[in-house]
Amino acid sequence: MALIVQKYGGTSVGDIARIRNVAQKVAAARARGDQVVVVVSAMSGETNRLIGLAQEISDQPDPREYDQIVATGEQVTIGLLALALQAIGVPARSFLGHQVPIRTDSAHSKARIAGIDGDAIRAGLDRGEVAVVAGFQGVDPRGDITTLGRGGSDTTGVALAAALGADECQIYTDVDGVYTTDPRVEPRARRLEQITFEEMLELASLGSKVLQIRAVEFAGKYRVPLRVLSTFDEGPGTLITLDQEAEGVESPLISGIAFNRDEAQVTLLGVPDRPGIAARVLGPVGAANIEVDMIVQNVGADATTDFTFTVHKNDYARALEIVGQICRDLGARDVKGDDNIAKVSIVGVGMRSHAGIASQTFEALAAENINIRMISTSEIKISVVIEEKYVELAVRSLHRAFKLDEQPPAG
Ligand code: ASP
Ligand code: MG
């Protein structure tokens, strides 16, 4: 008998028919002899609706009251799913965050889980019940309701799986796994049988929306076997593993390609080249709470430097303003900006043991006449900034160059 935590997202519980479908899936797992804990999100669109209501009254709602409001979506779905399970003869009991309890810090709207007491859930499982737990919410030391940030039900699922020592945490969603890239851009994209936590973490932070980043971090840290699979189709989904070799499959060079159209670039031209320039430029940007992604500095022959960095498009106007001021203060030549850029990244643990991935990447882009503006690398990732209009072409040519549409050799 295995203990499985299943998490169902908003689309999976979007209406009563779908909630009944989830109840059937839970019942099937239970019929196979497994104990099941289910975590659910609010019905799709509901959390946005609740946030909208709060914002109709205040554009900066009191954080405690905000959480009281936005946590209610999950209260409805746990009750409905428990009813749907009971209706098909499966004993079930729903739990709000504080009824588990899932203890968090007091950082409303982005709380972190501090600990989970699994006793009440275990007692229910021992009585033969399915536990249906509200995702996204917890309770702080004062007894106030907190929420974990958008998409936080993934984290609830993984944290519960860790606390209960579950055999697997299954994240049910509207796609049937993790893909080599977005199938809307490259129709030949392929579902991955497995991917490592490290790769998944890179892909999540590069903008793949399949899993919340914190859930992946949590699963890696507590070694929770994690699987992404579809609520609407049968299939094995994608297993997120600690180590690909351990699964007996030779790791492919590249596992996935991510892209992000949300960045903009700011360049400070002709800065006198002396120590402290990077700090002088990025200090005020950081102080304005603007997150900087890529940074490039090139020193010219005339002892001046061009300094370029990228920020989220939402912060572009502010960043330009701040750097404009710095330009005047430092006597630099000019400030330029461009928000028609995109970042394309290839990710794969195979890069560690293979040379030449970078040159293969650049050759593939050059063959399409795509100019690379910036490059950044980590041990398992290469990112390039290019003109936004070439994103799809770049993704498709890299997908082809690294043969991502072909099945990897089975081990
Ligand atoms: N309902 C919350 C949200 O929409 C949490 C979740 O779905 O994971 O962000
Ligand atoms: Mg989600």
Image (spheres, rainbow, N blue to C red):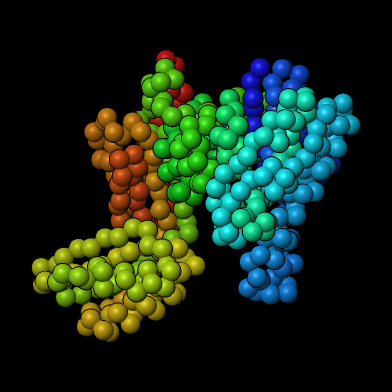
Q: Where residue 33 appears, x then y in whole percent?
A: 71, 17
Looking at the image, residue 55 sits to the left or right of residue 110; the answer is right
Q: Quadrant of the N terminus?
A: top right
Against 32, residue 339 (above or below) is below
Q: Quadrant of the C terminus?
A: top left
On the image, which quarter does residue 332 sit in?
Answer: bottom left
Looking at the image, residue 261 sits to the left or right of residue 34; the answer is left
Q: Where residue 331 appears, x then y in whole percent?
A: 22, 83
Q: Where residue 162 appears, x then y in whole percent?
A: 55, 34
On the image, which quarter does residue 235 sit in?
Answer: top right
On the image, which quarter does residue 322 sit in?
Answer: bottom left
Q: Is residue 234 visible?
A: yes
Q: Please state which of residues 184 and 366 is positioned toward the viewer in this rendering.
A: 184
Name of the residue lying farthest toward the right: 87
The residue lying at 26 percent from left, 73 percent from top is 280
The residue lying at 65 percent from left, 74 percent from top is 59
Q: How many marks overall?
A: 0
The residue lying at 70 percent from left, 66 percent from top is 65
Q: Is residue 192 visible?
A: no
Q: Please state which of residues 399 and 226 is positioned toward the viewer in this rendering.
A: 226
Looking at the image, residue 235 sits to the left or right of residue 189; the answer is right
The residue lying at 33 percent from left, 31 percent from top is 350
Against 11, residue 121 (above or below) is above
Q: Where residue 151 appears, x then y in whole percent?
A: 61, 49
Against 187, residue 125 (above or below) is above
